[in-house]
Image (tube, rainbow, N blue to C red):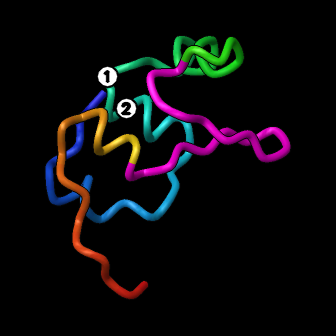
Amino acid sequence: MKGFTLAELHDLPATVDLLTAARALGLGRTKAYELAKKGEFPCRVIRVGVAYLVPTAELLKLLGVDPPASSPR
């Protein structure tokens, strides 16, 4: 699984799907879903229906990356 570059991390939208967050953290699909279902994913996970979303700012903070400056999207 290929990781992200710093530029790619900064270009992420406000939330990312669980697998994108898992990829950034070096977790596999099965482990990511297992942790999310148990409420043990390394950062906050928002469940919307059957989808799991992760706030990008929290993911970047966990990775020790400064969030990008506010930019209109």
Secondary element at tag 2: helix
Residues 19 and 48: in front is 48
Q: Are marks 2 and 1 in contact (CB under 8 Å)?
A: yes
Residues 67 and 10: in front is 67
Residue type (three-letter) at the residue carrying disc 1: Gly
Q: Residue at x 45, y 22 (%)?
A: 42
Residue furthest bottom as drawn: 72
For label 2, the crowd category at 10 Å Cα-Cα, with few meaning under 14, some 14 to 19 and many 20 or more, is: some
Horizontal side, residue 12 vs residue 14: left or right? left
Residue type (three-letter) at the residue carrying disc 2: Arg
Which region of the structure is painted magenta?
41-57
Instruction: Tell me where residue 20 sits by quadrant.
Output: top left
Q: Which residue is mark 1?
A: 26
Residues 59 and 50: in front is 59
Q: Residue at x 47, y 30 (%)?
A: 43
Quarter in which the N terminus is drawn: top left
Q: Which residue is mark 2?
A: 23
Horizontal side, residue 70 vs residue 28: left or right? left
Query: In the image, residue 23 lies at what x, y percent?
Result: 37, 32
Q: Residue at x 31, y 82 (%)?
A: 71
Q: Is residue 14 above or below residue 43?
A: below
Instruction: Tell me where residue 63 sits by quadrant.
Output: top left
Query: In the image, residue 65 lies at what x, y percent?
Result: 18, 45
Horizontal side, residue 66 vs residue 36: left or right? left
Mark drawn on residue 9? none
